Image: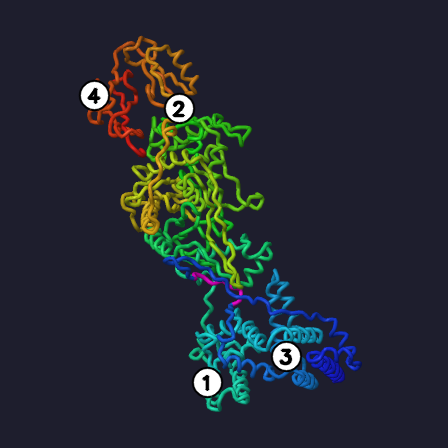
Amino acid sequence: MFSAVLGMIAFSAVAAVLVTASVTPMIAVSSVTAQSAIGIFNNLPSYISIGKLPGPNTIYALSAGKEVPVATIFDENRQQVAWDKISTGAKNATVDGEDRRFYTHGAVDPTGIIRAALSGLGASSGSQQGASTIAQQLVKNLAIQDALQAPTLKQQNQKINDAIAPTLNRKLQEAKLAISLEKKYSKQDILLAYLNIAPFGGTTYGIEAAAQRYYGTTAAKLTPLESATLVAIVQNPNQKAPTGKAGYAANTPRRNAILGQMLAAKHITQAQYDAGIKVVESSKTIKNIPPSQGCTAAIDNAQFWCAYIKTLYPSLTAFGSTAAERAKNWKIGGYKIYTTLDVGLQASAQGVENQWVPATLPTMDIGGATTSVEVGTGRILVMVENRKFNESTSKVAGTTAINYAVDQKNGGSAYGFQAGSTYKPFTLMNWLQHGHGLNDIVDATPNPNLDLSKFKDRCEPGGYGGTYGKYTNDEGEKGPFTVMRATAQSVNGVFLNMGKELDQCDTRDDAIAFGVHQGHTDTSDPSGFLQLQHQPSAILGTNSVAPLTMAAAYAGIANGGVFCKPVAIDSVISPEGQKLPGQAKDCSPALDPGIDAAVGVAMQGVFSGGTAGAARPAGVAVLGKTGTTNKSLETWTVGSTTRVSTAVWVGNATGQVPTRLTRPPVHCPGTANQVATLRNCVFKHTMEAIDAAYPPGKFPPAPAQYLNGTTVALADYAGQTVTAATAQLQALGFDVNVVAGEIPSAQPEGTVAYTDPGAGGKYAPGYLINIYVSDGTQSKTVPNVTGLPFPAAKGAIAAAGFTTDAVQGCVVTADPTKVGKAISTNPIEGWQGPAATKVTVEIGKLGSCP
């Protein structure tokens, strides 16, 4: 009892100081009676500002050219509103219930302080009446808000405890800061700030969010009864939020008390009071609508996009100049983030994805992703996958939080997915950069003893040893292929033999220039990613990448060799309404435009008679590449028009089930009924919708110098000695194999009867030339068929005595008079060899060859 009296005396003395200070600070300073209290008071901080209150971050996307909100993200469910957007009933309920002398006293209420002190004389611990004014409560709530911005939960809890500690020092500080507020702000400003910051249970803060949550209305439309119910919460939000039976029971007495105070203040009538206190709180009167926020609550088809956007803000200066500042500002919120997503195309792409790629299969953990990038800007238009978004800890079949389209650091899979043959265009670039051509002929036949030491690699000074190991061509291709045809048909043997003549590090650098990187985050690597691999196996696509990476790279190929980094955020509007930059357009030359045009011509063949024929959208020019990894674990179709590039991946999210051995519930027409072929229908139908919105044009032709390159036309060595022919061929860079035994030929016995491949074809250095030795008997001679259409040329070859039907080949020509006519043969005119030899007639064609 004695200690309580001393506490009352001390607190009352301080109260007198505070009251005097709030009116005339100079009088308080000169008062001798309160000198000790003033000493404590003067040492406390006195500056406070209402500042920026936490609020939601809103993500926008484009719908029919208009910006529409797709997701709201916040730590605190709060929407700040202006004074005229709050009902009179809510303002009256707050003042009457929390601080009825608000408009007549200063920052502190002397009557309330004395009452609280007197109450403490007979009160047990914890039952002391409060004496806080609205200004003082605002100070406390601002301190709590500041505490919630601390970087760790432990620091947050400590600062919150400091902000609500029932100590004399904390109450003095609160009072002094309240005085500072009243000197700086009007009563209206203070009440408005209080209504916007007050806690209303859970993550709901502010009168607007409370009105929406509990009544499904706005603060402007709150009735006096509804207002009293909401204001009743703030006294103890954890107990008095009307969210269940216990909450209803705890809220009702406080609500009724506030209604009584509103009646006493003549802010409601007796009839309103009588009706109000009779209302039984329940789920019938309280809607309790859960706040719709976070990526799970994003609009349909935008959940994964929302999660991706959340990973990007830490790198944007719009949110602050340092990482810590950006994190704090994002948490405080109030930003509007305008993104590149096209809502209409996104919905269309999701529909296509859902139609063709199931969310689950009984025999494999199937995954699928489609993403599209605008050519020339890098703006991401589409990002969908085959599963529903689920960021909860509960595992539900057909759902995931992993965004298969992006890198691991942005919420993607742990490693990305092997690129397969979609990586081959970078070897093609390197090929053309070093004087070779699209019409060059390279051997497709798999070599079981492919010598790794023959692969150059300046990034691997020690070189490689051993042999490559077993590899195959998808359709069992063998023999000579033009690089153009090998690209269209994705012939592994050709590309490995091309790679043997190139520096592997150059191929890797070409890929890097187009933004290609591995999808796995590596904290030990300063760049944040594992370096692209450049060993010979990388030629066939062993690097693991994200679909977004490949879509952006192919957009660069479609853009004349100018690569633009992917962009997801166009701009940001700050809480103060200032327009801030998003992700800047970042484009740079990656490849000579002439070489890029030649690469594009070859890649158009993929969709025109090549491996992506079933994926081609009708009536448009498309360049691209398909990819299938070892055991068909991952499958790809990546392609681009002149306007938009799209990457489609379908494969194993986890596990190693061959997609070619797995039957899907739907069959993509024109293909085998396999999971491996679904990507073709996804690409085709996704791009058809995109093409309607972004009508494409035509790609440029290949410059003549990149058609035939500088490779060597094979001479006719018939009749030469084997030794002389071997020396000449090796001097030209060819590999030579003398076939054992002799064959019928008109050439002198023991000399070269013919070579395979035969004379006239243009072959790359390193090509294996087989020499056949003559036994001196007669053979057949290839006739001159230049200028003849294929049927006539075929007949002339048969008439010359060849027993195997001639086949039609293709060669690109810029001369319209040569289109549809024989330009050359392989073997060439005058070549002699067995009657069973198959002669290829190269027929001229404009544009590109399949």
Q: Quadrant of the N terminus?
A: bottom right
- Label 4 sits on residue: 796
Distance between the Cα atoms at labels 2 and 1? Answer: 92 Å
Can residue 140 be seen here? The reply is yes
Q: How far across and down, in percent of the image, does residue 583 sit?
A: 50, 51
- Label 2 sits on residue: 711
Mark closest to the chain's N terminus, 1 or 3: 3
Q: Residue at x 28, y 26 (%)?
A: 842
Dot in front, 2 or 4: 2
Q: Quadrant of residue 24?
A: bottom right
Q: Cβ–Cβ below 8 Å for labels 2 and 1?
A: no
Q: Quadrant of the C terminus?
A: top left
Distance between the Cα atoms at labels 1 and 4? Answer: 103 Å
Mark closest to the chain's N terminus, 1 or 4: 1
Q: Cβ–Cβ below 8 Å for labels 1 and 3?
A: no
Q: Residue furthest top?
A: 748
Mark closest to the chain's N terminus, 3 or 4: 3
Mark closest to the chain's N terminus, 3 or 2: 3
Q: Looking at the image, is 559 positioned above or below residue 245?
A: above
Q: Nearer the viewer, residue 74 or 357?
A: 74
Q: Residue at x 43, y 49 (%)?
A: 653
Q: Residues within 10 Å of mark 4 (few under 14, many from 20)?
A: some
Task: Label 1: state its secondary structure.
Answer: loop
Q: Residue furthest bottom?
A: 270
Q: Looking at the image, is 717 positioned above or below residue 762?
A: above
The overriding secondary structure of the stretch rendered in magenta is strand
Q: Magenta stretch: give its range.
A: 69-76
Distance between the Cα atoms at labels 2 and 4? Answer: 29 Å
Residue 279, label in figure: 1
